[in-house]
Image (tube, helix red, strand yellow):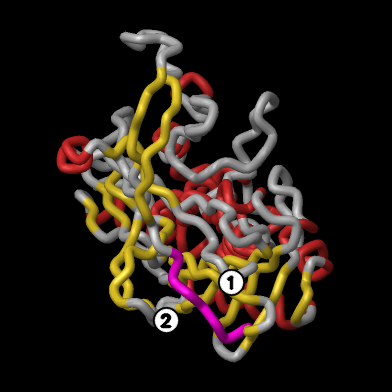
Amino acid sequence: MAKSSPTAPSFETGMLAYARSVQITEGLFHATRSDDPELRTPIAVLEKGVLGQSLDDKAKNPGKPNPQSVEFAVIPQGHDGVELSFSVRFMPLSLRPHGCGSTHVGETYQRLAAGYKAAGGYRVLAALYVWNIANARFAWRNRFQADEMSVTVRCDGITLRFDPFLFDLDRAADETEMAAALIEGDADDLAELIDLVTDGLSNGANKAVTLEVSWNAAMRPGQEIFPSQEYLRDEKKEKGLSRVYAKLPTRGADGLVQQASMHSQKIGAALRHIDVWHGSETHRAPIPVNPYGGVKETGAVLRDPKSKKGFYDLRAKAQPLLDAVENAADATEIPGEVHFLVANLVRGGVFASSNKAGEQNDG
């Protein structure tokens, strides 16, 4: 009797879910003073009435005044700076599926992660995440509000401080370039930090690593800052607010205040700008990792089904991808397709069956 051949490796199944490997807290905005580094005052979200004009081309009264109420946040008097702080936790949850419709497929994904780890792939992802922390992309519009700023990262006794102005947001920096942007700490500290993040993403003993991050910038009293903007819910519409900012109740010197905040999802979107492998000739900058390579700012989709470069197309090639990663002598030999595939698993989410869009989370 002839022996049956072993089942070919496969990444495709009706149900696949990965827990998010990068967990981020809500970011909080504080006002600071250069002459008192220990002072941190919660920045309150307030309301005001403004008289503007509608920009809608279907407005009922084009060109007429448009009174409205909006929320705003500014640097309070007596302060000359702002701090945005949060923490980010890196966990080894991409080593195996959180849920999978097939034992065989689940084992194939574990095999991919093991080969990727052995070849040093997780360190590539770790360095990209550290780059997006160091360059202050997570401050979004606020990043362009100041002429002086720094990013401080603390982890396991290491303190590093970067000058974000020395980074190009459209091109990933290597470790030498990141070290050159250090204001505090040195290249050895930077390498150790990247190693810690790598360990957090790939240590099979479920060891998590947490980074404490703060962005500090010089700003003038009364200068506006930009927290996350909320979608208008019915109760806000009834109140007549046309712009609502994210906020968290915080105990301040004068009692409870609604402190300006940045959503963890928005910070996460910035840190996920690590897809440097999309290969687009029209959009050369890194984009946030997602299965179809969607770019929110422009509406472009760089990994649509026609490109054959999206998550669902690539995972149909299990054997070639496994061969590539398991035969790689080091991270330089890992194809970009494998980096992209694993980066999506690190991102996490629920992935549908082949040729169907997966429901994704934002972190």
Q: Nearer the viewer, residue 124 or 160?
A: 160
**Magenta segment range?**
37-43
Q: Nearer the viewer, residue 236 or 355?
A: 236
- Position of 327 relative to 188 (above/below): above
Residue linked to disc 1: 78
Residue 254 percent location from the top left of the image: 35, 77
- The structure residue drawn at horizontal position 41% and vertical position 20%, both measured from the top left corner, is 65
Give the crowd class for mark 2: few <14, some 14-19, many >=20 residues within 10 Å: few
- The structure residue drawn at horizontal position 29% and vertical position 73%, both measured from the top left corner, is 256
Q: Main secondary structure of the magenta part?
A: strand
- Position of 10 relative to 213 (above/below): above
Mark 2: secondary structure: loop
Tell whether position 100 is magenta: no
Q: In the rendered structure, which disc, 2 or 1, sits on the residue that comes first in sequence?
A: 1
Residue 352 percent location from the top left of the image: 26, 38
Q: CA distance from mark 2 to mark 1?
A: 43 Å
Residue occupying the far bottom of the picture: 157
Give the crowd class for mark 1: few <14, some 14-19, many >=20 residues within 10 Å: few
Residue 255 percent location from the top left of the image: 30, 77
Q: Nearer the viewer, mark 2 or mark 1?
A: 1
Residue 284 percent location from the top left of the image: 69, 34
- Mark 1 is on which residue type? Gly
What label does residue 207 carry, if any? 2
Regarding residue 224, the answer to whether it shows in the image is: yes
- Mark 2 is on which residue type? Lys
Q: Nearer the viewer, residue 207 or 245?
A: 245
Quadrant position of the C terminus in the picture: bottom left
